[in-house]
Amino acid sequence: MRWMVVLLTARCALACTVVEGDRITGADLARADAAYSALPADAFVALAPNPGVQRSMDAGSLAAVGRRYGVTAAAGPVCFERRAIALTKERLQPVLEAALGKDIRLEILEFSRYAVPPGDIEFVDRELARPRAGHEEEPVVWRGRVRYGPRSMTIWAKVRVLKFERWIEAVSGIRAHTAITAQQVAVKSGWRFPFEHAPLTDANELEGKQAARTIAAGQAIVPAMLEAPLEVEHGDTVEIEVVSAGVSLRLPGRAETSGRRNDRVLVTSQAGKRLRAEVIAKGKVIIHADQSGSRTARRVVDVQSSDGGQETGDSAAAVAAGPVSQ
Protein backbone atom coordinates (compact mmCIF):
# COMPACT_ATOMS: atom_id res chain seq x y z
CA MET A 1 0.00 0.00 0.00
CA ARG A 2 2.81 2.43 0.88
CA TRP A 3 4.48 2.07 -2.53
CA MET A 4 1.15 2.85 -4.22
CA VAL A 5 0.89 6.13 -2.27
CA VAL A 6 4.45 7.07 -3.26
CA LEU A 7 3.72 6.35 -6.93
CA LEU A 8 0.50 8.37 -6.87
CA THR A 9 2.30 11.29 -5.21
CA ALA A 10 5.01 11.20 -7.91
CA ARG A 11 2.43 11.24 -10.65
CA CYS A 12 0.64 14.21 -9.09
CA ALA A 13 3.95 16.08 -8.80
CA LEU A 14 4.63 15.55 -12.51
CA ALA A 15 1.09 16.34 -13.70
CA CYS A 16 1.21 18.82 -16.58
CA THR A 17 -0.41 22.23 -16.47
CA VAL A 18 -2.75 22.77 -19.42
CA VAL A 19 -2.19 25.89 -21.54
CA GLU A 20 -4.67 27.31 -24.04
CA GLY A 21 -2.65 29.15 -26.67
CA ASP A 22 0.68 29.13 -28.47
CA ARG A 23 2.59 30.66 -25.51
CA ILE A 24 3.23 29.66 -21.93
CA THR A 25 2.64 32.82 -19.89
CA GLY A 26 3.37 34.01 -16.39
CA ALA A 27 -0.19 33.10 -15.42
CA ASP A 28 0.38 29.53 -16.64
CA LEU A 29 3.64 29.25 -14.70
CA ALA A 30 1.97 30.61 -11.56
CA ARG A 31 -0.71 27.91 -11.89
CA ALA A 32 2.03 25.31 -12.22
CA ASP A 33 4.03 26.63 -9.26
CA ALA A 34 2.75 29.26 -6.85
CA ALA A 35 6.35 30.38 -6.24
CA TYR A 36 6.05 32.32 -9.51
CA SER A 37 2.76 34.08 -8.74
CA ALA A 38 4.62 37.41 -8.72
CA LEU A 39 5.30 37.14 -12.46
CA PRO A 40 3.21 39.42 -14.71
CA ALA A 41 0.26 37.37 -15.96
CA ASP A 42 1.09 38.09 -19.61
CA ALA A 43 4.85 37.54 -19.26
CA PHE A 44 6.29 35.28 -21.97
CA VAL A 45 7.78 32.13 -20.46
CA ALA A 46 8.15 29.77 -23.44
CA LEU A 47 6.40 28.47 -26.52
CA ALA A 48 3.61 26.00 -25.86
CA PRO A 49 4.23 22.42 -27.00
CA ASN A 50 2.49 20.92 -30.01
CA PRO A 51 -0.76 19.03 -29.38
CA GLY A 52 -0.07 15.64 -27.81
CA VAL A 53 3.43 16.67 -26.69
CA GLN A 54 4.50 17.68 -23.16
CA ARG A 55 7.07 20.33 -22.37
CA SER A 56 9.08 20.17 -19.13
CA MET A 57 11.07 23.06 -17.66
CA ASP A 58 13.81 22.26 -15.15
CA ALA A 59 14.90 24.37 -12.20
CA GLY A 60 17.61 26.12 -14.24
CA SER A 61 15.17 27.22 -16.95
CA LEU A 62 12.70 28.44 -14.34
CA ALA A 63 15.39 30.42 -12.52
CA ALA A 64 16.33 32.15 -15.78
CA VAL A 65 12.69 33.18 -16.30
CA GLY A 66 12.54 34.53 -12.75
CA ARG A 67 15.73 36.60 -13.23
CA ARG A 68 14.31 38.03 -16.48
CA TYR A 69 11.39 39.53 -14.54
CA GLY A 70 13.14 40.19 -11.21
CA VAL A 71 11.48 37.34 -9.37
CA THR A 72 13.50 35.09 -7.09
CA ALA A 73 11.98 31.68 -6.50
CA ALA A 74 13.23 28.20 -5.83
CA ALA A 75 11.18 25.73 -7.79
CA GLY A 76 11.48 22.23 -9.12
CA PRO A 77 10.66 21.09 -12.67
CA VAL A 78 7.21 21.77 -14.10
CA CYS A 79 5.37 20.32 -17.08
CA PHE A 80 3.03 21.91 -19.63
CA GLU A 81 0.75 20.54 -22.30
CA ARG A 82 -1.63 22.19 -24.77
CA ARG A 83 -5.33 21.71 -24.17
CA ALA A 84 -6.74 19.14 -26.56
CA ILE A 85 -10.15 17.57 -27.03
CA ALA A 86 -11.38 14.46 -28.81
CA LEU A 87 -13.31 14.76 -32.04
CA THR A 88 -16.90 13.51 -32.10
CA LYS A 89 -19.23 12.51 -34.91
CA GLU A 90 -21.67 15.17 -33.72
CA ARG A 91 -19.01 17.85 -34.14
CA LEU A 92 -17.86 16.61 -37.56
CA GLN A 93 -21.24 15.96 -39.21
CA PRO A 94 -22.42 19.58 -39.73
CA VAL A 95 -18.96 20.68 -40.90
CA LEU A 96 -18.75 17.96 -43.56
CA GLU A 97 -22.33 18.51 -44.72
CA ALA A 98 -21.70 22.24 -45.11
CA ALA A 99 -18.60 21.54 -47.23
CA LEU A 100 -20.59 19.31 -49.63
CA GLY A 101 -23.67 21.48 -50.05
CA LYS A 102 -27.33 20.57 -50.27
CA ASP A 103 -29.05 17.32 -51.25
CA ILE A 104 -26.22 15.10 -50.00
CA ARG A 105 -26.48 11.95 -47.89
CA LEU A 106 -23.41 11.77 -45.68
CA GLU A 107 -22.57 8.86 -43.39
CA ILE A 108 -19.48 9.06 -41.15
CA LEU A 109 -18.11 5.55 -40.64
CA GLU A 110 -14.84 6.35 -38.84
CA PHE A 111 -12.66 9.35 -38.01
CA SER A 112 -9.36 10.27 -36.35
CA ARG A 113 -9.56 9.48 -32.65
CA TYR A 114 -6.56 11.43 -31.37
CA ALA A 115 -7.19 14.61 -29.40
CA VAL A 116 -6.87 17.92 -31.23
CA PRO A 117 -6.55 21.50 -29.98
CA PRO A 118 -9.64 23.71 -29.93
CA GLY A 119 -9.97 25.49 -33.26
CA ASP A 120 -11.82 25.64 -36.53
CA ILE A 121 -12.44 22.33 -38.31
CA GLU A 122 -11.94 22.63 -42.06
CA PHE A 123 -12.81 20.14 -44.81
CA VAL A 124 -12.69 21.10 -48.51
CA ASP A 125 -14.77 19.21 -51.08
CA ARG A 126 -11.92 18.99 -53.61
CA GLU A 127 -9.88 16.97 -51.07
CA LEU A 128 -12.57 14.30 -50.82
CA ALA A 129 -11.21 11.08 -52.35
CA ARG A 130 -13.29 9.46 -55.11
CA PRO A 131 -14.40 5.83 -55.05
CA ARG A 132 -13.24 3.36 -57.67
CA ALA A 133 -15.06 3.44 -61.00
CA GLY A 134 -18.15 1.28 -60.76
CA HIS A 135 -18.13 1.37 -56.92
CA GLU A 136 -19.92 4.67 -56.34
CA GLU A 137 -21.29 3.59 -52.93
CA GLU A 138 -17.86 2.67 -51.60
CA PRO A 139 -16.65 4.62 -48.50
CA VAL A 140 -13.80 7.05 -49.08
CA VAL A 141 -11.32 8.91 -46.88
CA TRP A 142 -11.64 12.66 -46.55
CA ARG A 143 -8.69 14.55 -45.10
CA GLY A 144 -9.16 17.85 -43.33
CA ARG A 145 -7.53 19.96 -40.66
CA VAL A 146 -8.06 21.81 -37.41
CA ARG A 147 -6.74 25.35 -37.57
CA TYR A 148 -5.52 26.81 -34.29
CA GLY A 149 -3.78 30.15 -34.42
CA PRO A 150 -1.25 30.22 -37.28
CA ARG A 151 -0.93 26.42 -37.31
CA SER A 152 -3.05 23.46 -38.28
CA MET A 153 -3.31 19.76 -37.49
CA THR A 154 -4.39 17.09 -39.97
CA ILE A 155 -7.52 15.04 -39.24
CA TRP A 156 -9.53 12.60 -41.36
CA ALA A 157 -12.91 10.95 -41.71
CA LYS A 158 -14.03 7.84 -43.56
CA VAL A 159 -17.36 8.64 -45.15
CA ARG A 160 -19.99 7.40 -47.57
CA VAL A 161 -21.30 10.21 -49.74
CA LEU A 162 -24.39 9.84 -51.94
CA LYS A 163 -26.39 12.25 -54.06
CA PHE A 164 -29.48 11.65 -56.17
CA GLU A 165 -28.23 12.12 -59.72
CA ARG A 166 -29.71 11.94 -63.20
CA TRP A 167 -27.39 11.21 -66.11
CA ILE A 168 -27.07 9.88 -69.65
CA GLU A 169 -25.00 6.72 -69.88
CA ALA A 170 -23.56 4.79 -72.80
CA VAL A 171 -25.15 1.34 -72.91
CA SER A 172 -22.71 0.15 -75.56
CA GLY A 173 -19.26 1.28 -76.65
CA ILE A 174 -19.19 4.36 -78.90
CA ARG A 175 -16.27 4.81 -81.25
CA ALA A 176 -14.45 8.15 -81.42
CA HIS A 177 -15.61 10.63 -84.07
CA THR A 178 -18.85 8.78 -84.79
CA ALA A 179 -22.40 10.04 -84.39
CA ILE A 180 -24.19 8.94 -81.22
CA THR A 181 -27.51 7.18 -81.78
CA ALA A 182 -30.46 6.88 -79.39
CA GLN A 183 -29.90 3.12 -79.18
CA GLN A 184 -26.40 3.65 -77.73
CA VAL A 185 -27.47 5.66 -74.66
CA ALA A 186 -29.95 5.52 -71.80
CA VAL A 187 -31.13 7.97 -69.16
CA LYS A 188 -30.29 6.77 -65.63
CA SER A 189 -31.01 8.10 -62.14
CA GLY A 190 -30.30 7.07 -58.56
CA TRP A 191 -28.25 7.64 -55.41
CA ARG A 192 -24.51 7.54 -56.13
CA PHE A 193 -21.27 9.37 -55.39
CA PRO A 194 -21.57 12.90 -56.85
CA PHE A 195 -20.18 13.33 -60.34
CA GLU A 196 -16.89 15.19 -60.60
CA HIS A 197 -18.13 16.86 -63.80
CA ALA A 198 -21.82 17.44 -64.43
CA PRO A 199 -23.11 14.85 -66.92
CA LEU A 200 -25.68 15.35 -69.65
CA THR A 201 -29.23 14.81 -68.40
CA ASP A 202 -31.28 15.34 -71.56
CA ALA A 203 -30.90 13.15 -74.66
CA ASN A 204 -31.68 16.20 -76.82
CA GLU A 205 -28.26 17.55 -75.87
CA LEU A 206 -26.73 14.82 -78.06
CA GLU A 207 -28.43 16.03 -81.20
CA GLY A 208 -25.96 17.00 -83.90
CA LYS A 209 -22.98 15.84 -81.80
CA GLN A 210 -20.52 12.98 -82.09
CA ALA A 211 -18.10 11.29 -79.71
CA ALA A 212 -14.86 13.25 -79.32
CA ARG A 213 -13.18 10.07 -78.06
CA THR A 214 -14.10 6.46 -77.45
CA ILE A 215 -16.83 6.14 -74.80
CA ALA A 216 -17.00 2.82 -72.97
CA ALA A 217 -20.24 1.09 -72.07
CA GLY A 218 -21.39 2.19 -68.63
CA GLN A 219 -19.72 5.61 -68.78
CA ALA A 220 -21.74 8.69 -67.95
CA ILE A 221 -21.52 11.17 -70.82
CA VAL A 222 -20.22 14.65 -70.01
CA PRO A 223 -20.00 17.61 -72.43
CA ALA A 224 -16.22 17.22 -72.82
CA MET A 225 -16.81 13.84 -74.49
CA LEU A 226 -18.72 15.43 -77.36
CA GLU A 227 -17.80 17.42 -80.43
CA ALA A 228 -19.58 18.88 -83.42
CA PRO A 229 -19.12 16.84 -86.61
CA LEU A 230 -16.72 18.11 -89.27
CA GLU A 231 -18.47 20.32 -91.83
CA VAL A 232 -15.47 20.18 -94.16
CA GLU A 233 -13.03 17.29 -94.45
CA HIS A 234 -9.68 17.10 -96.17
CA GLY A 235 -10.18 16.24 -99.84
CA ASP A 236 -13.85 17.31 -99.96
CA THR A 237 -15.15 19.37 -102.85
CA VAL A 238 -16.32 22.64 -101.36
CA GLU A 239 -18.10 25.77 -102.50
CA ILE A 240 -15.90 28.82 -101.95
CA GLU A 241 -17.70 32.12 -101.50
CA VAL A 242 -15.54 35.22 -101.88
CA VAL A 243 -17.00 38.51 -100.65
CA SER A 244 -15.53 41.94 -101.32
CA ALA A 245 -17.00 45.45 -101.56
CA GLY A 246 -20.58 44.18 -101.37
CA VAL A 247 -20.08 41.65 -104.17
CA SER A 248 -20.15 37.87 -103.68
CA LEU A 249 -18.68 35.26 -106.00
CA ARG A 250 -18.97 31.50 -105.71
CA LEU A 251 -16.55 29.01 -107.15
CA PRO A 252 -15.70 25.33 -106.60
CA GLY A 253 -12.59 24.20 -104.79
CA ARG A 254 -11.09 21.48 -102.66
CA ALA A 255 -10.48 21.39 -98.89
CA GLU A 256 -6.85 20.90 -97.90
CA THR A 257 -7.60 20.78 -94.17
CA SER A 258 -10.62 19.75 -92.10
CA GLY A 259 -12.75 21.96 -89.89
CA ARG A 260 -16.04 22.64 -88.14
CA ARG A 261 -18.32 25.63 -88.40
CA ASN A 262 -16.36 28.87 -87.75
CA ASP A 263 -13.00 27.09 -88.07
CA ARG A 264 -10.34 28.42 -90.48
CA VAL A 265 -9.33 25.94 -93.18
CA LEU A 266 -7.07 25.90 -96.22
CA VAL A 267 -8.74 25.45 -99.62
CA THR A 268 -7.50 25.26 -103.20
CA SER A 269 -9.49 26.73 -106.10
CA GLN A 270 -9.80 24.99 -109.47
CA ALA A 271 -6.95 27.13 -110.78
CA GLY A 272 -4.66 25.91 -107.98
CA LYS A 273 -4.80 29.05 -105.82
CA ARG A 274 -4.47 28.21 -102.11
CA LEU A 275 -6.65 30.36 -99.88
CA ARG A 276 -7.62 30.50 -96.22
CA ALA A 277 -11.35 30.44 -95.59
CA GLU A 278 -13.90 30.13 -92.79
CA VAL A 279 -16.28 27.17 -92.62
CA ILE A 280 -19.92 28.34 -92.69
CA ALA A 281 -21.86 25.15 -93.47
CA LYS A 282 -21.51 21.60 -94.69
CA GLY A 283 -19.20 21.78 -97.71
CA LYS A 284 -19.22 25.60 -97.76
CA VAL A 285 -16.52 28.15 -96.87
CA ILE A 286 -16.30 31.91 -97.11
CA ILE A 287 -13.49 34.41 -97.67
CA HIS A 288 -13.96 38.07 -96.73
CA ALA A 289 -11.38 39.49 -99.10
CA ASP A 290 -11.54 43.01 -97.65
CA GLN A 291 -10.69 41.66 -94.21
CA SER A 292 -8.31 38.84 -95.06
CA GLY A 293 -5.72 40.95 -96.84
CA SER A 294 -5.50 38.25 -99.53
CA ARG A 295 -4.55 39.82 -102.87
CA THR A 296 -5.43 36.57 -104.65
CA ALA A 297 -8.95 36.63 -103.19
CA ARG A 298 -9.43 40.28 -104.15
CA ARG A 299 -8.30 39.58 -107.69
CA VAL A 300 -10.93 36.84 -107.97
CA VAL A 301 -13.64 39.30 -106.99
CA ASP A 302 -12.30 42.03 -109.29
CA VAL A 303 -12.75 39.74 -112.30
CA GLN A 304 -16.53 40.18 -112.25
CA SER A 305 -16.01 43.69 -113.65
CA SER A 306 -13.36 42.59 -116.15
CA ASP A 307 -13.84 41.73 -119.84
CA GLY A 308 -15.17 38.20 -119.89
CA GLY A 309 -13.27 36.93 -116.86
CA GLN A 310 -10.10 35.77 -118.54
CA GLU A 311 -7.68 37.26 -115.98
CA THR A 312 -7.31 34.04 -113.98
CA GLY A 313 -8.49 30.48 -114.15
CA ASP A 314 -10.64 31.20 -111.09
CA SER A 315 -12.73 33.76 -112.91
CA ALA A 316 -13.90 31.30 -115.52
CA ALA A 317 -15.76 29.37 -112.81
CA ALA A 318 -16.89 32.41 -110.80
CA VAL A 319 -20.59 33.26 -110.70
CA ALA A 320 -21.61 36.73 -109.55
CA ALA A 321 -24.10 36.44 -106.74
CA GLY A 322 -25.03 40.11 -106.48
CA PRO A 323 -24.63 42.43 -103.50
CA VAL A 324 -24.23 40.84 -100.06
CA SER A 325 -24.91 42.75 -96.85
CA GLN A 326 -21.94 42.62 -94.50
Image (cartoon, rainbow, N blue to C red):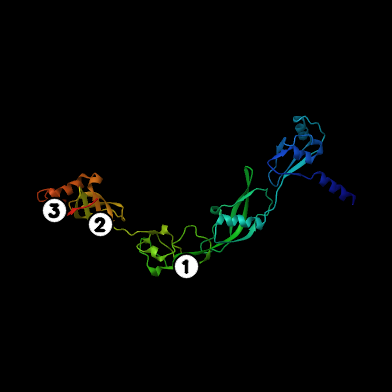
**Three-letter code, disc 2:** Lys
Question: Residue 149 at what x, y percent from top left?
Answer: 64, 43
Residue count near mark 3 (Cα–Cα under 10 Å), binned few <14, some 14–19, many ≥20: some
Residue 66 in sight:
yes
Q: Residue at x 25, y 52 (%)?
A: 286
Mark 1, secondary structure of its residue: strand
Of residue 234 and residue 208, the one placed in the foreground of this image is: 208
Residue count near mark 2 (Cα–Cα under 10 Å), binned few <14, some 14–19, many ≥20: many
Q: Is residue 103 left or right of residue 255?
A: right
**Three-letter code, disc 3:** Ala
Mark 2, secondary structure of its residue: strand
Q: Earlier in the sequence, mark 1 or mark 2?
A: 1
Residue at which label 3 appears: 316
Residue 212 in sight:
no
Q: Earlier in the sequence, mark 3 or mark 2?
A: 2
Q: Residue at x 57, y 54 (%)?
A: 99
Question: Residue 41 at what x, y percent from top left?
Answer: 74, 37
Q: Earlier in the sequence, mark 3 or mark 1?
A: 1
Mark 3, secondary structure of its residue: helix
Labels in figure, total: 3
